[in-house]
Each structure stands twice: as C-alpha cells, then as structure tokens.
Amino acid sequence: MCKFLIFLTIPFFSFSQIFSDFLPTATNNGQLVHHTYFSLSYVEKHEQPEWVFYEIKKEQILGVVDRKNNFRVDKAISTGSANLHDYRGSGYDRGHLAPAADFSFSNIAMSESFYMSNMSPQDPSFNRGIWKRLESLVRKWGANNNIYVVSGPILNDCSVTIGESIVCVPKYFYKVIYDSMEQRMIAFILPNEKGEKNIQEYVCSTDYLEQITNIDFFPILEDKIEHYLESDINKEKWDW
C-alpha cells in the first residue's frame, strides 16, 4: 500500500521537461550544455563533465546505426573542450560516459555521443571490461522500461592529469539509473581500474553517492519520494 501511494504522487514529465527541470544539479561552476539526446555539466577545471544525463526509451531500436568513432571537440563548450591530442599517448582510453551503443538508434545521436565533452580518461582494462559490462546491463534494463541515466567521474581527487589541457584522470566513476514507472533507483561507484568483482558489489545508495559528489541527481522529486528511492541500495528491485 505504501509503494502504491508513492507511485500515485509521481508527476508526469514531458520530454522537454526532462531536459530542463529533471536534470541533476551542477557544481564546480559546470557549464550546462544540451545536445539533441543528452545533456551535461562540463567542468572546465577538469576538462570533462561532472555528469551526463540521458534517457533510454524502450521504443527506440538500438543497433540501427553503426559506431562511427568520429571523436571531436565539442564547440558548444564555451571555454573549449578537451581534444584528441590530450589523450594521445597517455595510456588512457577516451571513455564514453554516455555510451555510443545507447545512441545507436539514429545518426545524429551516434555522432553527438563522440563529442569530447562526453569523454573521460579511463584505464583500458576498466573501459573495455567492467564499465562495458555495466553499460550492457543498463541497456538491458532500458529495453523493458524507459529509464533515466546519469553517468560521470568523481572529481574529488585529480592528482593525475593528461595532455596540455590538464585533463583530470578520475579514480572513480559512477552511474545512477532511475525507472520512474517501476519506482526504483540504483547507483554504482566503480574504481578506474580492472574490475574483478561481480557488478552487484559496486552498488551503493544514491544518498551515499550524493554525499561524495555533492550532486543532487533528481532534485525535482518530492522529498519523501526522493528519500524512499535514494536511501537504500535496492539491488533486489532490478533484473540481473
């Protein structure tokens, strides 16, 4: 009965509302940038976004468009985004925060996913390993229900940098997934290294992640609903 009442109080959000009111808060003087299918908060100091926000819709057919690998500077970043030279020879991958495979439903979506503003330095064993497996799992969840995804680096420790632009190499990355229809939320924190554990072992509460990042991920939610969704780790509510 309690869950049913909570479900009834959730407001309906249109597509336009999602990309205005539904976004996480920006910290570190992040520049808010809207692309066609995702938004981000770009932190010039660290030359990468603190978060990228997008939606996976079950009606969007993925795999229609092939991966293009057209990495390029994002001209929407007023101070200039990181560039290809920053990563060249660094030993780190240009790691997607919003993965290209999630945008394989259209040419525009696929192309925009390769803006350098959507990249963060990732250890190759991490990017091609546990991070890739988590991305696949999130797509699986999005095939059944429309979900909102927030993904980003944790920028608390930037003792290692690459390139002339001084791009921060994060020690950790995160994802938060919110399914508004099923009223469930889950968060992950993963170290930027080869992941040896089961994906479920990287789950944390959204509250804990917000304390670390100082980001409020879904600020438009009513306080009671937000507490209900963010205070637990909620593993049992998701199909693994």
Image (tube, grey):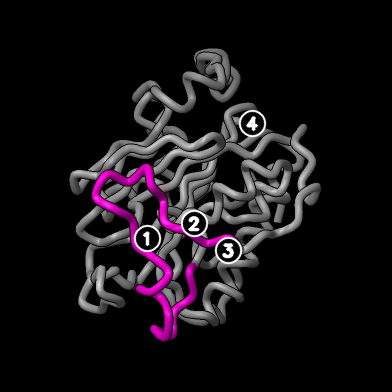
Instruction: Tell me the residue that label 1 is attached to.
Output: 153
Q: Look at the numbered disc 4 and give the secondary structure of its residue.
A: loop
Quadrant where the N terminus sits is: top right
Magenta stretch encompasses residue 83: yes
Left or right: 130, with 203 as reference point: right
Magenta span: predominant SS is: loop
Front of the two marks 2 and 4: 2
- Is label 2 in contact with label 4 (beta carbons under 8 Å)? no
Which residue is label 3 attached to? 200
The quarter of the image holding the C terminus is bottom right
CA gap, disc 3 and disc 4:
20 Å
Is 163 drawn above or below residue 115 in the view shown? below
Q: Nearer the viewer, residue 103 or 197?
A: 103
Structural distance between the alpha carbons of marks 4 and 1:
27 Å
Label 3 with label 4: CB-CB less than 8 Å: no
* Residue 132 image point, x, y percent: 62, 67
Quarter where residue 58 is shown: top right
- Spatial CA distance of label 2 from label 4 is 24 Å
Q: Which residue is mark 4?
A: 182
User: Answer yes or no: do the residues labelled 2 and 1 have beta carbons within 8 Å?
Assistant: yes
Instruction: Give the mark, 2 or 1, whose residue is nearer the N terminus.
Output: 2
Q: Residues within 10 Å of mark 3 (few under 14, many from 20)?
A: few
Residue type at tag 2: Leu
| Magenta extent | 70-94
- Which label number is shown at residue 97? 2
Magenta stretch containing residue 237, yes or no? no
Q: Earlier in the sequence, mark 3 or mark 4?
A: 4
Quote the CA–CA distance across marks 1 and 3: 19 Å
